[in-house]
Amino acid sequence: MAALPKLKCVFNLAFMLTNKISLSEIWKKLAPAEKDNYLGWRLASIVIAGIIILAGITTAGFVYQNIYSTLSNTYSIFVLSSELGMDIVDMNSYQKTATIIANKKTVTVIPENIRNIFDYQVDLVVTTSTATTTKKTK
């Protein structure tokens, strides 16, 4: 039987108990080799925090778009439908409107001697003026 490859990190509880590996030994294997070399861990934590924040924003947007706005629209419809009331009819305006509609339905008769508005011939009438006096003429 071939030997199993040596794993860097072992998280199997049964393996840890049988081989008596403590959590501190596992932590030492996960820790960086040099104490000042934390750049990889910082970048990983920034990326993970960014993913968590992005997931929270996406979830909030989804909840707002699909749940909150639907409830808000439903509430508005409910309020508007419950406050419907009778409007007072202005009878004078109704009579005027009914008369206008009735007049639109009547046929008007066009007279035969209608003036032609496109005929621009102008008849010149020349008048002469004379001096007037205050005396009465017979």
Image: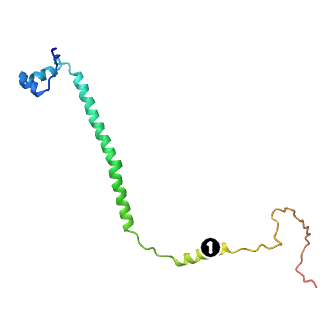
Taking the spot 53% from the left edge, 78% from the top edge, the residue there is 91
Taking the spot 43% from the left edge, 74% from the top edge, the residue there is 86
Q: Is residue 50 left or right of residue 109?
A: left
- Dot 1 falls on a residue whose secondary structure is helix
Residue 58 position, x and y percent, is: 32, 41
Q: Is residue 43 left or right of residue 4?
A: right
Q: Is residue 104 left or right of residue 77?
A: right
Instruction: Work out which quarter of the rendered image holds the C terminus and state it.
Output: bottom right
Taking the spot 73% from the left edge, 74% from the top edge, the residue there is 108
Residue underneath mark 1? 101
Residue 21 position, x and y percent, is: 8, 22
**How busy is the neighbourhood of tag 1: few (under 14 within 10 Å), some, or many (20 plus)?**
few
Specify the amino acid type for callout 1: Ile
Q: Nearer the viewer, residue 50 or 3?
A: 3
Q: Residue furthest front?
A: 1
Query: Residue 34's image quarter?
Result: top left
Q: Is residue 73 above or below residue 35?
A: below
Q: Residue furthest top?
A: 2
